[in-house]
Image (spheres, rainbow, N blue to C red):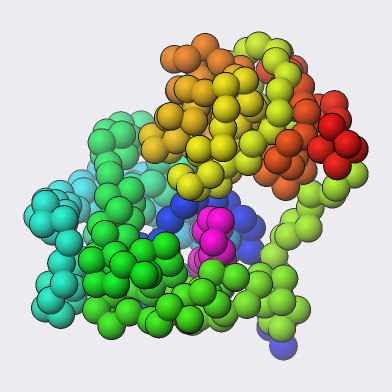
Amino acid sequence: MDSPIHFTKTLERDATLFVQGSWAQGLDIDLAQRFGINNPYRPMVLHYATAESLQIWENMTSVQWMLDAFFERHSASTVFIEQVIDEYIPLLEELRGFWSQEVITTKEDIERYTKLVRRASLNISTCYYAGMDTRTPQAVLDRVVRVREEDVFYSRNDEFVRACVAAKNDRLAQYAAFVLPHELFELPSEDECMVRAQGTVLVAGTDLYVETIEHFATQHPEYIFDDLKKAVDLSEEVKGQIAFRGKVSGRVVIVRNQRQMAAVQEGDIMVTPMTTPDFLPAMKMATAFVTDEGGITCHAAIVAREMKKPCIIGTKTATQVLHDGDLVEVDAEKGVVRVIQRLESGV
């Protein structure tokens, strides 16, 4: 038996399997066909989706191999990244044409749109990966940063897919996140979507397993999910990077998706995998932000500095250690969130 493949959870989003699955297919299949980069460490990406959110688990050995391959091309000149971006710009314009229609329903349009999303996803993800590699030459980095700052690929396509699903069957609107890339024309049944919402694992954007990630892990010993149970209920604090200084106390509200934003009241501590522009209404109400992910230039850090609210980012486990209703102190002078009192203690 080959050595098991280790996966690390790198992101958690309120995203769709349609867009994320297309991205995974691009990395696992199209990378070799279009860029001549034949990654031997596959699959590169697994997704785990529930009614709350979608988790991205990456094979970091595979990611590092790909980053090395990209770096080889970047180190010589900016030619490769310029070709990637030059190809992406007209693809994005074509996507904007679809978005301007608000929804599409014909088989021809859906097939063309699906192929377009998959193709463009590899180009924009190449820019994202180049931007996260500290070795990337400055000339290349400057180019991809400009693209990333202006990019709306993931957010707009997620919105568009959700709208298309709702237009075809409004009863499936709440389950749009569970529609796969090949299912947008012939949608799965409501019963199937309800089951998927309990837990769905998607391997390399193609192989679907309708089960919890814990059960999947026991059934597939060839895959190891690092730190799947890292957070322990006994933990009374989490540490991260300071994005904006300050010290406040308040009740925790976990926000994994847009539907949970309404629960955030004035003075609450918003704890989330990572914020996006859609989270701004809740961020205005909260007195502090704590995230699992992100660096000093992430959305939560930027907004915290603009709003002058204490913020700790990159804790990795805040959404697992902390629970709705916990009373906590956010010490953004030291980068620590401490539990003062758990909800179950009777408060």
In magenta segment, residue 46? yes
In magenta segment, residue 288? no
**Which residue is at a point 77% across and 27% down the rendered structure image?**
328
Does residue 32 sit above or below 51 in this rendering? below
Q: Magenta segment, which residues?
A: 43-55
**Which residue is at a point 75% across and 56% down the rendered structure image?**
227
Picture quadrant of residue 223? bottom right
Residue nearer the viewer, 76 or 138: 138
Residue nearer the viewer, 92 or 286: 286
Residue 4 visible at all: no
- Image x and y of residue 7, in percent: 63, 63
**Which residue is at a point 88% across and 36% down the rendered structure image?**
346
- Image x and y of residue 182, in percent: 31, 79
Does residue 60 sit above or below 130 in this rendering? below
**Which residue is at a point 52% across and 23% down the rendered structure image?**
285
Count of all numbered marks drawn on residues in the image: 0
- Residue farthest to the bottom? 1
Does residue 155 sit above or below 168 in this rendering? above
- Image x and y of residue 344, in percent: 86, 42
Q: Quadrant of the N terminus?
A: bottom right
- Image x and y of residue 63, in percent: 51, 58
Q: Quadrant of the C terminus?
A: top right
Residue nearer the viewer, 201 or 25: 201
Picture quadrant of residue 33? bottom left
Residue 15 visible at all: yes
